[in-house]
Image: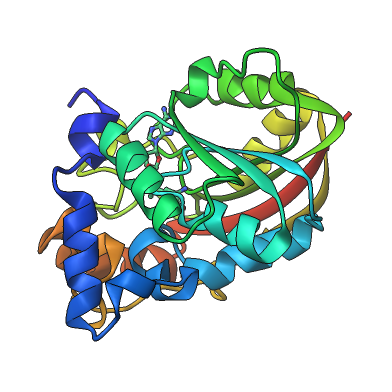
Amino acid sequence: MSYDANTYWGRQGLERAILDALAATGKDVGKLTIDDLAPADQFHSGGKSSTVRLARLAGLKPGMRVLDVGGGLGGPARTLAAEFGCQITVVDPTESYVRTGEALTARVRLADRVSHRVGDALTLDTGGSMFDIVWTQNSGMNIGDKERLYAGFARVLRPGGLLAFQEPMAGPVQPPIFPVMWAPDATTNFLRAPDAMRAMIEAAGFRATAWDDVTAELAGPSTGAAVPAHAIQRIVMGNAVDEITRAGKRNRDEGRIVMIQAVLVRA
Ligand SMILES: C[S@@+](CC[C@H](N)C(=O)[O-])C[C@H]1O[C@@H](n2cnc3c(N)ncnc32)[C@H](O)[C@@H]1O
């Protein structure tokens, strides 16, 4: 199967679907906070708490310029702005996520600190801007050319800047059970083992200061029934999330997919 981010990830009417799903839980969508939004805009294992974990691991400080690559709907970016005082540019190839992300950012009045752009991780164009932090959470799984991906991260980071990521990687038992959140089958799944990833990233000009296996800590729901209607996973994937969740539990329990949070300094 060929891969196109807009086809695989994109959805029409996403802002409306998110607001309606949150309203159904009793939220006042006229007064949403980033915590109200979190189940519906943090699209990765561990939700908002894993974003905060990674931000602390990276030691994010007010005023830091962050490029969030594959930043999706911008849930992580809004957290970094509201709780860590950072200035974030979100880049994502999925146009409906960029539009919805902009609308949600305006809704929680963070547009002065978070901007959203359409763009691909493999062809990052920052107009010459250099960032203090390149941030990426659960967004490289569909990318085979990881050497190019990480070389691109190094290119847009100032010397001494940090790469902070959370990524699923191949566990000691292969292959994974499909479908996974990012791929219905092996043709669009590009995970490598942690040791191979670390060696490749260090060869791209980084030195790891933290490399944590957070598989157990960030374990998601074990059954589809535990994924509510206002979870972004269900809003985007619909009922397919039930089988994805079953496979996800097996992938974790059987050591087929592991989750890594890491911070690396650009040499
Ligand atoms: C599971 S979502 C994670 C979104 C966001 N990082 C978060 O944690 O909320 C995966 C994201 O990867 C993005 N993505 C897929 N292929 C990409 C690429 N080539 N470059 C950048 N982002 C990509 C998708 O558009 C989607 O937003």
Regarding residue 220, the answer to whether it shows in the image is yes
Q: Position of residue 103 (x, y in %)?
A: 35, 48
Image position of 135 with respect to 59: above or below: above
Q: Along the horizontal axis of the image, is 248 left or right of 145? A: left
Front one among 93 and 129: 129
Q: Residue at x 39, y 58 (%)?
A: 107
Q: Residue at x 56, y 45 (%)?
A: 114
Q: Along the horizontal axis of the image, is 199 left or right of 214? A: right
Front one among 201 and 228: 228
The C terminus, quarter of image: top right
| Residue at the left extreme, as displayed | 239
The N terminus, quarter of image: top left
Q: Position of residue 118 (x, y in %)?
A: 40, 26
Colour setup of the view = rainbow
Marks counted in the figure total 0
Q: Position of residue 155 (x, y in %)?
A: 72, 18
Point out the quarter of the image occupied by ligand 1.
Answer: top left
Q: Residue at x 48, y 68 (%)?
A: 34
Regarding residue 213, the answer to whether it shows in the image is no
| Residue at the bottom extreme, as displayed | 26
Front one among 42 and 164: 42
Q: Along the horizontal axis of the image, is 162 left or right of 48? A: right
Q: Quadrant of residue 205?
A: top right
Q: Position of residue 242 (x, y in %)?
A: 16, 68
Q: Residue at x 47, y 48 (%)?
A: 138
